[in-house]
């Protein structure tokens, strides 16, 4: 079984977990609603009180935007933490609810905040450097950003499940990455591939509707893409939690995942040569 095939099997297993707890799809929806409300709360007063034609942002505006960015990062990470908590409860034999997921995230609220600050700050720095760099620089910075995302992929499950602080969680996530040779990237690619395939019908419907001036078709296509985004965001959190368990214990609890799929996805290059 190839790594891509294994990662697709992992995505199917994550879907089984989602089917057992369909209400978890409400978490990305709540996250989106909270995000929209926060953006409106910060930006509407500025637009109402400012002459946009002659507007030049000052220090106060930049501070406001930075605070807004931190709040948005915290909202996203908080609801992702709720999803991780629910997935952990399901894999551990429990029966999570929307309420238990949110309470689990709330218990780690103090631990989540520093991670939101670190995550948002790194993202802003990389974006700022990318805007100032040339083509080659942008490619390099993009690779740095991708490496950061992969190395810290398990930080949130570590914080939620173990209650560790940010520095300890980042260190442990990096150790897990080195131990598995970063092969979790292959599984993430598989999950992304599933999302890409699922999005194609929506893209086709939107294109067809736009080409023929049929707003109904455009709306249907947009709703399809929104539904795919919600499902894939939920699957990503579930997969992230299962990945954490495998990287920690060498096995995923519960009967949803086949550990052989994870073993194939994580097998190092040396082991691959040995088995050929």
Image (cartoon, rainbow, N blue to C red):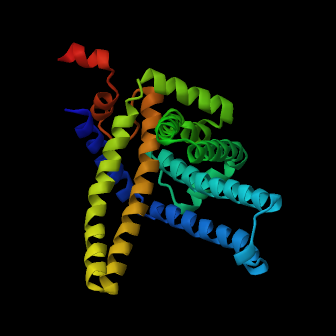
Of residue 115 and residue 209, the one placed in the foreground of this image is 209
Up-down relation of residue 48 to residue 183 (above or below): below
Quadrant of res 210: bottom left
* Apparent side of residue 82 relative to residue 243 in the rendered image (left or right): right
Residue appearing at x 38%, y 42% in the figure: 188
Relative horizontal placement of residue 28, taking residue 112 as reference (left or right):
left
Where residue 275 sits in the image (x, y, percent)?
A: 20, 17
Q: What residue is shown at x 30% (from left), y 86% (from top)?
A: 213
The residue positioned 75% from the left and 78% from the top of the image is 51
Residues 156 and 90: in front is: 156
Q: Is residue 67 above or below residue 135?
A: below
Residue closest to the eye, 3 or 222: 222
Which quadrant would residue 111 be assigned to in this image? Answer: top right
> Left or right of 108: which side holds 90?
left
Residue at 70% x, 49% y is 109
Image quadrant containing the N terminus = top left
The part of the image, by quadrant, that contains residue 267 is top left
The answer, for residue 93, to whether it is visible in the render is yes
Residue 133 in the image: x percent, y percent?
56, 41
Q: Residue 25 at what x, y percent from top left?
A: 45, 62
Residue 181 image offset from top left, x and y in percent? 41, 23
| Residue 92 shows in the view | no
């Amino acid at each position: 079984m190839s790594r891509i095939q294994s990662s697709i099997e992992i995505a199917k297993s994550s879907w089984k977990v989602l089917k057992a707890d369909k209400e978890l799809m409400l978490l990305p929806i709540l996250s989106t609603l909270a995000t929209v409300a926060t953006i409106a709360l910060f930006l509407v007063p500025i637009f109402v009180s400012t002459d946009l034609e002659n507007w030049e942002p000052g220090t106060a505006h930049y501070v406001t935007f930075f605070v807004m960015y931190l709040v948005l990062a915290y909202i996203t990470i908080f609801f992702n933490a709720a999803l991780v908590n629910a997935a952990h409860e399901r894999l551990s034999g429990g029966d999570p609810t929307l309420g238990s997921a949110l309470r689990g995230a709330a218990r780690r609220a103090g631990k989540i905040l520093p991670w939101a600050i670190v995550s948002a700050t790194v993202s802003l720095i990389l974006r700022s450097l990318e805007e100032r760099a040339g083509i080659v620089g942008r490619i390099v910075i993009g690779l740095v950003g991708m490496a950061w995302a992969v190395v810290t992929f398990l930080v949130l499950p570590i914080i939620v499940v173990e209650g560790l602080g940010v520095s300890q969680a980042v260190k442990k996530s990096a150790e897990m990455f080195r131990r598995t040779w970063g092969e979790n990237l292959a599984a993430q690619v598989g999950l992304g591939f599933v999302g890409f395939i699922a999005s194609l019908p929506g893209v086709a419907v939107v294109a067809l509707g736009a080409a023929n001036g049929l707003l109904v078709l455009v709306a249907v296509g947009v709703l399809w893409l929104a539904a795919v985004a919600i499902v894939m965001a939920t699957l990503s959190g579930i997969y992230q939690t299962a990945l954490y368990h495998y990287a920690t214990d060498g096995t995923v609890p519960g009967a949803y995942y086949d550990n052989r799929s994870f073993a194939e996805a994580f097998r190092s290059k040396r082991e691959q040569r040995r088995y050929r």
